Amino acid sequence: MASDFMNDPRWYKDAVIYELHVRSFFDATDDGVGDFEGLRQKLPYLESLGVNTLWLLPFLESPLKDDGYDISDYYSVLDMHGTLDDFQHFLDEAHERDMRVITELVLNHTSDQHPWFREARDPQSDKHDWYVWSETTEKYEDVRIIFTDTEHSNWNWDQKAGKYYWHRFFSHQPDLNYDNPAVREKMKEVMFYWFDMGVDGLRLDAVPYLFEREGTNSENLPETIDYVKELRAAVDERYGPGKVLLAEANQWPEETLPYFGAEENGDGQAESTGVQMAFNFPIMPRMYMALRRENRRPLVEMLELTGEIPEDAQWAIFLRNHDELTLEMVTDEERDYMYHEYAADRRFRINVGIRRRLTPLLGGERRRIELMNALLMSLKGSPILYYGDEIGMGDDPFLGDRDGGRTPMQWSPDKNGGFSRAPHHRLFKPPINRGPYSYEFVNVEDAERDEHSLLHFTRRLLALRNQHAQVFGRGTFELVAVENQAVLAFLREYEGKQVLVVANLSRYAQSAHLPAEERLAGLVPVELFGKTSFPPIGREQPIGREREAGERRQGENGEGPERHPEPYHLVLAPHGFYWFALRSEQALIEEAERRRRVQQEEHPGALPMLEVEDGVENLLVPTMARGRGPERFESLLPDYVSKQRWFGSKGTPIERVSVEDAVRLQAEPKTRKSV
Ligand code: BGC
C-alpha cells in the first residue's frame, strides 16, 4: 500500500529532495557514463539516506554543450543513459519505494541542433517564427547578459537565415518565441508527455525569460506569469491535484512571488494558481553571508521578505546545486564580500557567481557544514541536497564551465571511485582523484563504516527532519528575537506541535537569552537528537514587595503571587545548534506513564523499565534538568516497593520513596536496562 507521502497531493510540502545527474551517478553498463540502470541500483542508498524525492538533471537528446540544458529532442532519452524503458523502469521502482521524481522542462530555449531550429533557419519555413529573429542587434537593448564569461550579446548572427537570433544563455541555445501560440501549445504537449509517463514534478528551467518586450529587461513579464498560470491550469485540468510545477526564477523576492499566482479562495486563504513550488534564491547566498559575518541580519531580512506565500505553495531551499553559487541577486557590495570571502582564488569565479561545492566552500569545517545543513533542514521550505554533498565531495577547478562540481559520485576508494568499471580514459568526466577530496578519502563505502562520518550525520539529520516532517514542511515560521545577533532562533509550529531552532553563526561559543514570553513559559525544551529534556522555560520567583503582595492575595482569594515568564538562557558551542521540541511538563509525564503502563501490560510482573539514554549515573545524581535526575527513578519505586515480599507493610500504598544516597560499587557497574 502506498504511503501517505505517495497518496497526498500536497506531497511536495513534505519533500526532502536529492538533486542528481544520471550520467554522474552510477555506471551499471561499464561504458564510462552513469545510466538509469545504475541509478535504479542505487535507490536503496538514497532511501537509506532519508530523501523522498529525486530531481534529475537533463537526460534527453542533446549535444551536451550546456550539460543537457541544450535539448535537441524533448521526447527521447540520450542513449548514453539507456532507453525510455530504462527510465520508466527506474521511475516505477522509485515510486514503489515511495519516492517522487522531478525532471526538467527546459522551456526557454532549445539546442541549435534541434530539428525545429534547423528548419527555422529557413525564413520561409513554418518553424521560422518559433524562434526570435531580428535584422539588427538594436532590439531589446535593456536586457542583461547572463553568461557574462562567454557571451557578449544576446543576439547571434545566422548565416542561413540572414538574420540574428535571440538567446539568453549560450549562443548555441536559441530562445523559443513564446509570442507564437504554436510554441506555447507545443511546450504544453511536452509537459503532458512527461507527466503522463508518471513524473511527479517538472522544474521550469529559466522560466523568467520566456517573453521579450521592448523597453523592459524582459524578465518576469506579465505575459510570462500568465503562461505559467496557463500551464498550471492545464495540469490541474488533466490530472487534478498532485502534479507539481517548480519555478527556477533566480530573482529578487518581489519578482519571484508572482510565479505562485496567489489568489484568494472561498475561505479567504491565498491559493496558488501558478507554480506550487519555487526555488528560494534570495535566502541562499544570505545563509553564507550570515555565516561569514557571524551575524544573522542578512538572512533575517530575506526570510522576512519571502515569508508570505500561498497556503498550498512551498519554497524549495538549497545550499548548493549544479550551477554556480549565484550572486546575481545581491547588491554589488554583498557580491564583493562574497567573492572575497568564498572565492579568493579566482579560478572559482564564473559568470556572476562561485563554482564550488558545499564542503570546500566551508573550508571542509565539519561544524559549519553541520550547521548549514541543520538550517537547510529546518528553515521554511522543502530542502534540496546536491548529490555528493552528503559525503563532503569536493570540486575540480581544472574542469571547464560549471563541470568542476558535477564530477562522478564517489562510491568507494576503488577504481574510478567505484563509479564505473570502464577504463579511466573512457569516463565522461574524471572523478576527483587528487587532494583531500579525492575518492580515496571521500567516498560512500568508507563513510558507511565510520559512524562519525558526515554521511551518518546527514542521515540522522534527515531522519529527524522526517520524524517531524509536518512541522518543518508545513509549519508556521516565526523568528524569535534573541538579542545576540550571532544567534538565529526561530519557532516552527504545526497543529500544536512546536519545534524551536537555535543556531550559533559564530565560530565562538555564545550565550543567548530567549525573550520572556507567556506562551513559552512552562514548556520543556526536549533536544531532538538526544531526546534530552532541558530545564523548563521558567517564570520568575517574585521577590520583595511583589512577593508579599502575592502572599496576601493568596491568603484572601487563593490566587497566589503573580509570576512573570522569565527569559530563557542557552549556551551554544561554536557553530552549535539546537532543535528543541517544546513539550508541556504534563505531556512528558503522561508519556512516560503511558510507556510504563504499556510495558506493565505487556510483561506483568516484570521489573519496571527505565530508559537511560544519557547514562545510568544521571539516574542517581540530581541535575538541573527536571525529570532527568533521580526523580525518574523515584517515581517507579513506590509501586515496586509496595509489592515486595520483604516490605513490611506489603500491599499498603506508599506515597513517596526517595533516593538519599548512591554508592558506586564497581568502577564499571554492569547494569541491565531494568531496575
Ligand atoms: C540551468 C543552467 C543552464 C541554464 C540554461 C539554468 O537555469 O540551471 O544549468 O545552463 O539554465 O539552460
Image: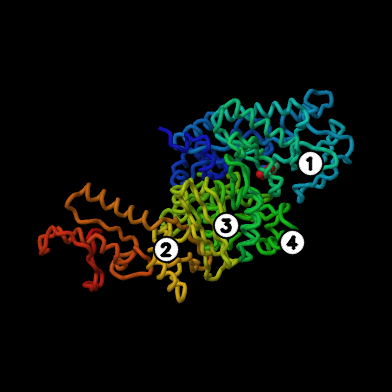
The residue beneath circle 1 is 218
Left or right relative to 310: residue 184: right
**Mark 1 falls on what kind of element?**
loop
In the image, what residue type sits under mark 3?
Answer: Leu
**Mark 4 falls on what kind of element?**
helix
**What's the CA distance linking mark 4 and mark 1?**
25 Å
Quarter of image, res 238:
top right
Q: Quadrant of ligand 1?
A: top right
**What's the CA distance linking mark 2 and mark 3?**
20 Å
**What's the CA distance linking mark 3 and mark 1?**
35 Å
Ligand 1 within 8 Å, label 3 CB: no
**Mark 2 falls on what kind of element?**
loop
The residue closer to the viewer here, 273 or 399, is 273
In the image, what residue type sits under mark 4?
Answer: Glu
The residue beneath circle 2 is 536
Task: Please report contact status of discs 4 and 3: CB closer than 8 Å, yes or no.
Answer: no
**What's the CA distance linking mark 2 and mark 4?**
43 Å
Dot in front, 2 or 4 = 2
In the image, what residue type sits under mark 2?
Answer: Pro
The residue beneath circle 4 is 333
**Mark with earlier residue (4, 1):** 1
The residue beneath circle 3 is 479
